Image (cartoon, helix red, strand yellow):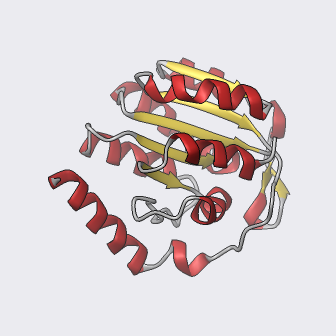
């Protein structure tokens, strides 16, 4: 399944919520679903899941979706245990597993396709974990997943899709952080 097609399915079912996208997923997501509630502040690889956990705990009435990469998650596997222990019911952890560090030179991720993130998440205390290899089953299952209590991990077995611009200044900009802060403040008080 192509990453951009999988993310378009998510955008159809989750048009207005908080999303913490990491690196290549962030570049794709910014083009597919530009929105002020895209949390584009995760400049260090591996930190997306931790940032998303902080948001889930601070905003318990909001659904939080993190679009993680396989290489990124491998750099912070301890976050699975922390997330499982905290048990935020508003947490959906989507791992875009393509077996390469795509934005860092397309080097192979150790373990590549063999890493079983769904099993790791369950062992770490997540309530549910799913793996999808095809777009149709992902599209059919996503509405129920979004309605389920988390934490939930979804491992999407992907390959690169349509190339989107890698806009590093946008994901690291103070303006993006301020847009998110303002949009979240309005959402929390409204």
Q: Position of residue 104 (x, y in %)?
A: 75, 66
Residue in front for this viewpoint, 32 or 47: 32
Position of 108 relative to 151 (above/below): below
Where residue 125 appears, as percent x and y from the top left, is 47, 20
**Residue 82 in picture, x, y percent from top left:** 41, 33
For image coordinates 35% across by 71% down, the residue present is 179
Looking at the picture, tell me which residue is in the foreground, 160 or 72: 160
Residue that protrudes farthest toward the left in the picture: 189
The part of the image, by quadrant, that contains residue 45 is bottom right
Please tell me whether residue 65 is drawn above or below residue 35 in the rendered image: above
Q: Is residue 181 above or below residue 138?
A: below
Please, which residue is most extreme toward the front here? Answer: 12
Along the viewing direction, whichever of 19 and 107 lies nearer the viewer:
19
The spot of residue 37 in percent (x, y) is 40, 59
The N terminus - image quarter = top right
Residue at (81, 67) in percent of width and height: 105
User: Compared to 60, does 26 lie above or below?
Assistant: below
Q: Tell me the quarter of the picture where residue 151 sits.
A: top left
């Amino acid at each position: 399944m192509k990453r951009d097609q999988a993310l378009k399915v998510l955008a159809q079912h989750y048009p207005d919520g908080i999303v913490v996208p990491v690196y290549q997923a962030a570049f794709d997501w910014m083009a597919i679903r530009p929105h002020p509630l895209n949390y584009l502040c995760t400049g260090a690889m591996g930190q997306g899941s931790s940032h998303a956990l902080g948001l889930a705990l601070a905003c318990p009435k909001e659904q939080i979706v993190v679009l993680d990469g396989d290489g990124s998650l491998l750099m912070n596997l301890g976050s699975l245990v922390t997330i499982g222990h905290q048990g935020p019911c508003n947490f959906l952890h989507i791992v875009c597993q393509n077996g390469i560090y795509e934005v860092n030179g397309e080097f192979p991720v150790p373990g590549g396709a063999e890493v079983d993130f769904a099993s790791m998440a369950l062992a770490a205390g997540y309530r549910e974990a799913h793996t999808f290899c095809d777009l149709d089953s992902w599209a059919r299952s996503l509405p129920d997943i979004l309605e389920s209590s988390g934490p939930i991990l979804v491992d999407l077995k992907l390959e690169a899709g349509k190339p989107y611009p890698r806009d590093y200044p946008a994901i690291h900009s103070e303006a993006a952080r301020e847009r998110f802060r303002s949009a979240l403040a309005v959402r929390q008080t409204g």
